[in-house]
Image (spheres, rainbow, N blue to C red):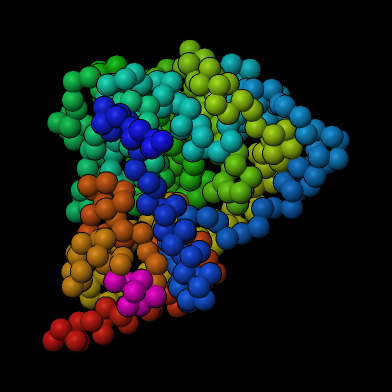
Amino acid sequence: MAVRAPSDSLAPMRARASATVMLNETLAALRAKGETVHSLASGDPDFATPQHIVEAAIASLQRGETHYAPTRGIPPLLEAIAHYRRRRDGAEVDPTREVLVSPSAKAALATAVPALIGIGEKAMILTPSWVSYSELVRIAGGVPYEVPLAADDDFRLTYDRLRSSWREGTRLLIVNSPNNPTGRIFDHDEIEALVRFSSERDLIIISDEIYEEIAFARPNIGLLSWPEGRERTVLVSGMSKAFAMSGWRLGYAVGPAALIDRLLPVHQHTLACVPAFVQHAGAAALAGSFEPVETMARTYKERCMAVLDVLSASQQLRAVMPDGAFYLFVDISKTPHPESGEFAQRALSEAGVLVVPGESFGAGGERHVRLGMTAPRAALVASARRLVDWLEASDNDEN
């Protein structure tokens, strides 16, 4: 008996595949076939998790902590998160009521969105932005719409842009700083515009700050540091990027107790808890030395500068030093292949270089590609040179 196809009425709730996950799967498949691919597509830190974090997990396992853990999180990690937010944002956070530990920042987002938006309600999403925001809104039965930020204005956010883009029935505003893929960090004026606009329209803000420790130009300004916006903000962060713990799957949400209480039932019925030994590793990360974090951030900055130096040899590519995160968002509008999807396909098939097309990040990302700085410097430089040489050869062929 044939399985009945899903009803078309569910189409608005049907998520599209993750472009970045699919690219990683493409890379693995090509390499499994023995093909040489130079990847600039990864968002996975290439560093080992610092040893003191690993040792904390081992100690927890040796204590036999392999059973269900408290749903909200174990007290040592909840307290470490509250202390960290106090130190970073100047915010007083109640570890027992205003924190929820989750198996990754992505899982925290996947919990927050359905908890905070109703069927048919709308969510504003600034683009370029991470590929999963819109899809999580769709999965929750909400309606995402984009607020494209302009490359020629350095992807700056303004109050007027928010006001002109707003639609009736909007409940959520999802933001990300430092931004994936652009590397932009909101300045004070942008944060003020966010807080003012969300207050006027009674919006809940989900602020994804997973890259907050990887900042080059200036420190990231956390939404929790603005008292006027804290009552309507759920901050999401985690350990994957700053602490090179992507495979551990550990993140969290922080916000007013009234909002965290709305996340809790979704978390209970889907994720339940995070393994205790992973949480002890997270507590060790936040309570321990940040020297490894600072070293990794400096290395990402040096890699960005080295690749920018290579790209500057091309008249067809334009990129600027990001404020933070570990990506370069490269303008390809002057190349023979300005559409990012075609550019990425040709870069892979003709130059053997894997990049992420900017169209994956929404309307604001078109005519760009994202390059990840998560590989040794020499490999990144070699891959960037392949891109430049390929474009130069393509240009000569056309002339």
- Res. 313 visible in picture: no
Asked whether 321 or 255 is in front, the reply is 255
Left or right: residue 174 versus residue 362 is right
Q: Is residue 295 above or below residue 18?
A: below
Q: Position of residue 374 (x, y in %)?
A: 51, 61
For the point 24% across and 65% down, the residue is 342
Q: Main secondary structure of the magenta part?
A: helix
Q: Is residue 296 above or below residue 11?
A: below
User: Image point 69% across, 52% down: which residue?
Assistant: 50
Look at the image and give the residue range highlighted in magenta. 346-352
**Quadrant location of the N terminus in the rendered image:** top left
User: Could you say where residue 90 lies in the image, as x and y percent from the top left?
Assistant: 53, 28
Question: Residue 130: x and y, percent?
Answer: 37, 45
Residue at the spot 42% in from the left edge and 17% down from the top edge = 231
Residue 126 appears in the figure:
yes
Q: Is residue 208 left or right of residue 146?
A: right
The quadrant where residue 233 appears: top left
Is residue 257 a member of the stretch shown in magenta? no
Give the residue furthest to the front. Answer: 1
